[in-house]
Image (cartoon, rainbow, N blue to C red):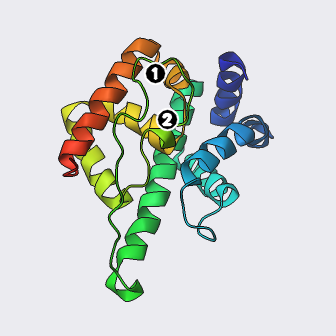
Amino acid sequence: MSQEHVTTILQAVERGEAGARERLMALVYDELRGMARARLADEQPGTLQATALVHEAYLRLLDDRVAWQGRGQFFAAAALAMRRILVDRARAKHTIKRGGGAQREELEADTIDPNSASNMAPDADIARVDLVKLDSALDKLAVMDPRLADVVQLRFFAGLSVEQVAEAMGSSSRTVKRDWSFAKAWLHRELGEE
């Protein structure tokens, strides 16, 4: 899908044109579902389904009433919505009322050559993590360097490739690869990983 086409429909949504929301959903649904499927690949069966995550994220996006400037900004907002949904669910699982006992899950480093031009999903880079701890660490990273936090959010929560993140952020793939490598190392240290 072209950047211009999505931007045009986003502007129609902002103007309140009849049918614009439906056209937007039809246009971005498959990509949002792919993002959700990539993010949920390592989840326990029977938890949140990709379709449910897409629908909940889409509803949150429309409720926010934000004027997106283009495709990249829309998908960044979608990644943030998915992050919030997944973190909220993880927090609910960890409550005493529901049995508590969050499990520690490893953040794998250097499973992919950071100089590789591959389009592998970020789940190959970061396996299963405690989403609540990751959310807290990302908030800290966002204070230090918002761009790095955006890269992690787009790679991890949205499942975008390096090239897609570069397009969404208006950056080069090389810069995104460097930022991704640095952010992973920082997260390992922040989360207490070896």
Percent across and percent down for residue 138 are 29, 45
Determine whether 182 is above or below 31 in the image: above
Asked whether, in this view, residue 94 is left or right of residue 72, the answer is left
Position of residue 169 measured from the top left corner of the image (x, y, whole percent): 45, 21
Circle 1 SS class = helix
| Residue annotated with mark 2 | 76
The quadrant the N terminus occupies is: top right
Q: Residue at x 20, y 47 (%)?
A: 194
Amino acid residing under circle 2: Ala
Label 2 packing within 10 angstroms: few (<14), some (14-19), many (20+):
many
Q: Nearer the viewer, residue 78 or 89?
A: 89
Reading the image, the residue beneath label 1 is: 169
Q: In this view, does 191 lie to the left or right of 157?
A: left
Q: Is the residue marked by circle 1 packed among few (<14), some (14-19), or many (20+) residues within 10 Å?
A: some
User: Horizontal placement of 67 versus 28: left or right?
Assistant: left
Residue contact between numbered discs 1 and 2, judged by CB atoms under 8 Å: yes
At label 1, the amino acid type is: Met
Q: What residue do we see at 44% from left, 55% from top?
A: 84
Q: Earlier in the sequence, mark 1 or mark 2?
A: 2
